Amino acid sequence: MRIITNTKLAERNVNLGKWASYGGIALLVAALFANLYALFGRPNDTQLIIVVFALFIVGYLLSNVGMFVNNRWARRADKGLADALRGMEKYTLYNYRLGASHVLAGPSGVYVLHPKYQAGPIEYVDGKWTHPGAPPRRLFNFFAPREVLGNPAAEAESEVESLKKFLKKHAPEAQLEPKPLIVFMHTRAMVSAKDSPVTALHVKQLKDYIRRQPKAASSVTPVLNDLETKLGLAPD
């Protein structure tokens, strides 16, 4: 399988998330020591109290930015998807290159892959996504917010729209109909979403699912090859 990844973007954001987390933790620790100093050394120093609050707020925000970025980038979904699709020689996986984060193209058409990382049971029932195994939201989540399931179908459709906008700008002649796929990456994810408006499956099922799809009426390869040349894209 051909893989074309914006590696610089991925690595930059991984580093951004890492240093934002480290910086946030450092500021929170500084806020703790400054608070202790204010309590026992200078209890009436208003300016020091303001500094303590400022350190706490900035540290909290920065650490949360770091966790948000890490949830998106540190797991390197591009590598996980590439491993899952290994051996599909007639397909190309585009990561962070075509507007949508992950685009798979080959004989059966174009797919926008939307990875999710929740563990445990994930269900789509009566028009709603649920994650029964998720821990309840308590005070702990204020300090360490967990990644919520959200609405994977709507998120995947949004990624499709991002791809369409990109193609409209860079290849307006392209007549492609990208199909969204929700891919749950966690080894302990158990997906029950047969009624979902967007196909949802476990990453271990992804390769077999793609292989079972009928060939597209017209090949997407020439269009995407032209786009690669136009944008100067090259396989990893």
Image: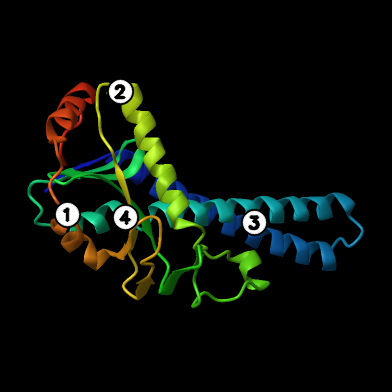
Tell me whether circle 2 and circle 1 mark residues in contact (CB < 8 Å): no
Q: Amino acid at mark 4?
A: Ala
**Of residues 169 and 220, which is closer to you in this image?**
220
Q: Position of residue 106 (x, y in %)?
A: 15, 44
| Mark 3 closeness class: few <14, some 14–19, many ≥20 residues within 10 Å | many
Q: Secondary structure at mark 3?
A: helix
Query: Which of the 4 quarters of the picture holds residue 191?
Result: bottom left
Q: Amino acid at mark 1?
A: Gln
Q: Position of residue 18 (x, y in %)?
A: 45, 53
Q: Position of residue 232 (x, y in %)?
A: 20, 25
Calculate the distance from the C-alpha at mark 1 to the C-alpha at mark 3.
47 Å
Tell me which label, 4 or 3, sits earlier in the chain. Answer: 3
Q: Amino acid at mark 2?
A: His
In the figure, 136 relative to 19: above or below? below
**Of residues 65 and 130, which is closer to you in this image?**
130
Calculate the distance from the C-alpha at mark 2 to the C-alpha at mark 1.
27 Å
Residue at label 2?
170
> At 31% from the left edge and 39% from the top edge, which residue is drawn?
8
Q: Secondary structure at mark 1?
A: loop
Calculate the distance from the C-alpha at mark 4 to the C-alpha at mark 3.
26 Å
Position of residue 72 in the picture relative to residue 207 (left or right):
right
Calculate the distance from the C-alpha at mark 3 to the C-alpha at mark 2.
40 Å
Residue at label 3?
60
Q: Amino acid at mark 3?
A: Tyr
Q: Position of residue 146 (x, y in %)?
A: 54, 65
Tell me whether circle 2 and circle 4 mark residues in contact (CB < 8 Å): no
Residue at label 4?
77
Q: Which mark is residue 213?
A: 1
